[in-house]
């Protein structure tokens, strides 16, 4: 590709000076997709459709009637419904399912003239942190093809990383936008829970799932959030607070901030040495700029991952019960009666990790163990929320690594699934508490693998989070 654009404003500048057309831009991205097919980032490319839409956007640009996303070519994760298109959640059980409606976020993106170029590979039903559980095979990291892309939105992150689209939309349950963004050197934003409608997102864990953008600039993250955010009559959990003009009001933060960082992220032996070094270096820079950066102990750190997995597997067990071989999706050809339809269709249609999580969830919800696991995890979640809210009474942001280390070897998760679970240690706090969080690229390690640091803010404080992120990247 002749030029990688870092922001939509750059694209619009070239469109206005007639250096490029939207149609030409789409053709460039399609060429990049073909060139990087070996990375396995896309499950399907909407090539002809994208070119047709591009011509229409070019026409509207000439008339001056184009939307605010005109010129932005995006990819969507394969668990986001798009009317008339297949959506599989990268699972055999939905491999030929075509959506009869579009997700609210898809409708809002299209209304502003974004062009959706394809659907991206992901962990099956968004269950994973490496994009290795997909029915369509793992996604490879563009920085090193022997490494994972991160998950579950790994395809979305690699599509942006390798210049196969300008931006992408993923979903974040326990870090599934932020962690792959960190592994791929991009920006990943998880908004406040409820800020963006979940209508049309294939559910994994309903009280955690949240869509978010993966971009190369804070400006584009702000613009996409502005377009997608807002109340939705089809989602009773969507927030009713007015949506700020995130992009218009985006300005580099200038005031001195109070920032907390988890002391365990530096003291723990489980955190990679180079991740620690970049965190320490960043803390030093922030202090040199006059900010207050204070270590804090988070006494519930050891309970974050266990509480998270008890709760999300319980919700997954309930949400995935609808895939039974009767209503829609895969039905086993070996089924002979109702019972065998259920058993065979689910056994053959779901992958190993999804079955593992359904069984875990069913176990923690069972009569004999409900109070011991699920009810207790709910209480722990409340304690974590209260502690996090207390921190934000004193501090503007919480700083921590996005992941304990850089992208790891493809195949590690298969050997030990707990590796994947523990990799969520720094991302699940924002998910358990519903606060917004953003992963920001902070360069590469000595082997050329991207590293990311994460900032958390109080509920619905995305504007300040984005403003400070813009400043942070210029440190």
Image (cartoon, helix red, strand yellow):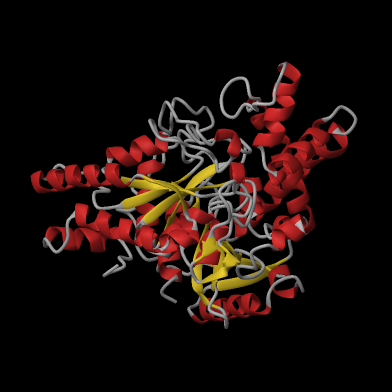
Residue 85 spot, x, y in % from top left: 40, 35
**In the depicted structure, whether residue 124 falls above or below residue 182:** above
Q: Residue furthest front?
A: 334
What residue is rendered at 80% in x and 31% in y?
365
- The answer to whether 422 appears left or right of 170 in the picture is right
Is residue 188 visible in the rendered structure shown here? no
Residue pictured at 45% horizontal, 30% vertical: 98
Q: Position of residue 140 (x, y in %)?
A: 54, 62
> How far across and how far down the image is residue 94, in percent?
55, 34
Regarding residue 118, the answer to whether it shows in the image is: yes
The image quadrant that residue 112 belongs to is top left
The relative height of residue 92 versus residue 325 in the rendered view (above or below) is below
Residue at x 75%, y 55% (from the top left corner): 417
Above or below, 384 against 232 in this view is: below
Q: Furthest-right residue in view?
A: 368
**Could you say which is closer to the camera, residue 463 or residue 164?**
164
Quarter of the N terminus within the rendering: bottom left
- Is 218 or 250 nearer to us in this picture? 218
In the foreground, 7 or 74: 74
Q: Seen in the image, is 348 located left or right of residue 34?
A: right
């Amino acid at each position: 590709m002749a030029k990688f654009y870092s922001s939509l404003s750059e694209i619009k500048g070239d469109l206005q000076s007639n250096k490029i057309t939207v149609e030409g831009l789409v053709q460039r991205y399609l060429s990049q997709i073909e060139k990087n097919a070996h990375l396995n980032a896309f499950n399907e490319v909407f090539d002809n459709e994208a070119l047709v839409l591009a011509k229409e956007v070019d026409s509207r640009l000439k008339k001056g009637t184009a939307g605010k996303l005109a010129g932005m070519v995006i990819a969507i994760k394969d668990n986001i419904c798009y009317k008339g298109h297949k959506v599989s959640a990268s699972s055999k059980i939905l491999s030929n399912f075509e959506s009869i409606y579009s997700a609210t976020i898809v409708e809002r993106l299209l209304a502003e003239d974004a062009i959706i170029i394809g659907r991206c590979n992901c962990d099956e039903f968004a269950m994973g942190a490496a994009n290795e559980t997909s029915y369509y095979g793992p996604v490879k990291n563009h920085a090193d093809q022997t490494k994972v892309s991160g998950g579950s939105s790994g395809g979305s992150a690699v599509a942006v990383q390798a210049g196969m689209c300008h931006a992408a939309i993923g979903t974040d349950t326990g870090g599934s936008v932020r962690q792959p963004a960190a592994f791929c050197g991009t920006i990943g934003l998880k908004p406040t829970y409820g800020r963006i409608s979940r209508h049309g997102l294939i559910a994994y864990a309903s009280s955690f799932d949240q869509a978010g953008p993966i971009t190369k600039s804070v400006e584009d993250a702000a613009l996409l959030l502005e377009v997608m955010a807002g109340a939705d009559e089809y989602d009773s959990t969507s927030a009713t607070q007015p949506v700020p003009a995130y992009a218009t009001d985006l300005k580099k933060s200038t005031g001195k901030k109070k920032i907390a960082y988890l002391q365990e992220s530096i003291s723990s032996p489980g955190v990679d040495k180079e991740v620690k070094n970049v965190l320490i270096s960043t803390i030093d820079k922030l202090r040199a700029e006059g900010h207050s950066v204070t270590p804090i102990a988070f006494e519930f750190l050891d309970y974050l991952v266990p509480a998270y997995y008890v709760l999300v597997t319980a919700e997954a067990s309930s949400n995935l019960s609808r895939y039974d071989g009767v209503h829609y999706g895969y039905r086993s050809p070996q089924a002979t009666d109702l019972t065998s339809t259920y058993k065979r269709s689910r056994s053959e249609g779901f992958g190993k990790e999804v079955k593992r999580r359904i069984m875990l969830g069913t176990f923690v919800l069972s009569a004999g163990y409900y109070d011991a696991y699920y009810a207790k995890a709910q209480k722990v979640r409340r304690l974590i929320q209260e502690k996090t809210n207390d921190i934000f009474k004193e501090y503007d942001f919480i700083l921590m690594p996005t992941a304990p280390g850089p992208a790891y070897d493809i195949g590690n998760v298969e050997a030990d699934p707990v590796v994947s679970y523990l990799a969520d240690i720094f991302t699940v706090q924002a998910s358990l508490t519903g606060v917004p969080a953003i992963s920001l690229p902070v360069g590469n390690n000595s082997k050329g693998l991207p590293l990311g640091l994460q900032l958390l803010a109080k509920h619905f404080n995305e504007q300040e989070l984005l403003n400070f992120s813009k400043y942070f990247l210029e440190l």
